[in-house]
Amino acid sequence: MKFVFTDKKVTLPASVHAYAEKKVGKMDRYFKNEGEASVVFSVEKGRNVCEITVRSGSMILRSSESTSDMRASIDACVSYMERQIRKNKARLEKRLRTDAFERTVDAAEISDFAPEEEESEFKIVRTKRFPIKHMTVDEAILQMNLVNHTFFAFKNADADGAFSVVYRRNDGGYGLIEDDT
């Protein structure tokens, strides 16, 4: 697995990078293709934040954790990603290695043991149908604000009627998702 480390507003010793490489590197057993891991370390409001993004083929896994210790943040991120893979292993089995879940447990890993969650099906509880209108991005943002929603789907008149979604970001700004086909 290839690694890219980024330290934002913090200077970490090489031992923390080596620890992250060791922990995240264990996830390589799940992927058919060689993965690329991007690990971002930062400190926000006195908390150690670790963000890990793993790309392998068309699959992208992402996790972000904040704790009082950077190594604990790394452990929490890796643990979360492994839980997500295990939870969705039936859906992901075409993308994962066939022997990904066959492994022996050594004494060091017993403390990290957590029972596997039972996989549930995606259950659609309600379906809504409505006409999607042609409008500009500004009109879509206005309409989204008028109905007090956090996102709004529309056909973008500026992009020849391509399906688009505007959404309200946590920082107060707006985002746009466009269909590139």
Image: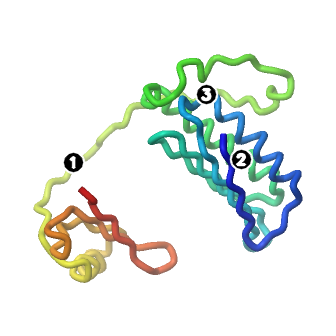
Residue at (48, 41) in percent of width and height: 59
Element type at mark 1: loop
Instruction: Name the amino acid type tagged 2.
Output: Ala
The answer to which of marks 1 and 3 sits earlier in the sequence is 3
Which of marks 3 and 2 precedes in the sequence?
2
Residue at 86 percent across and 22 percent down: it is 107
Q: Quadrant of residue 163?
A: bottom left
**x, y percentage for residue 98?**
53, 19
Q: With respect to residue 4, does 173 lie above or below?
A: below
Q: Residues within 10 Å of mark 3 (few under 14, many from 20)?
A: few
Q: Quadrant of residue 152?
A: bottom left
Residue positioned 77% across, 20% down in the render: 105
| Residue found 76% across the figure and 44% down from its top | 21
Which of the marked residues, 1 or 2, is nearer the chain's N terminus?
A: 2
The C terminus is located in which quarter? bottom left
**Dot 2 lies on which element?**
helix
Q: In the rendered structure, find residue 127 and report the number of the disc placed on it.
A: 1
Which disc is residue 76 wearing?
Answer: 2
Three-letter amino acid code at disc 1? Thr
- Tell me the number on the disc at residue 116: 3
Q: Is residue 60 or residue 106 the one in the foreground?
A: 60
Point out the frontmost of discs 1 and 2: 2
Tell me residue 137's x, y (percent).
25, 78
Dot 1, how many residues are within 10 Å of its Cα: few (below 14), some (14-19), or many (20+)?
Answer: few
Q: Residues within 10 Å of mark 2 (few under 14, many from 20)?
A: some
Q: What is the secondary structure assignment of the residue under circle 3?
A: loop
Residue type beneath disc 3: Glu
Kindly check if marks 1 and 3 are in contact, taking CB atoms under 8 A apart as contact. no
Q: CA distance from mark 2 to mark 3?
A: 16 Å
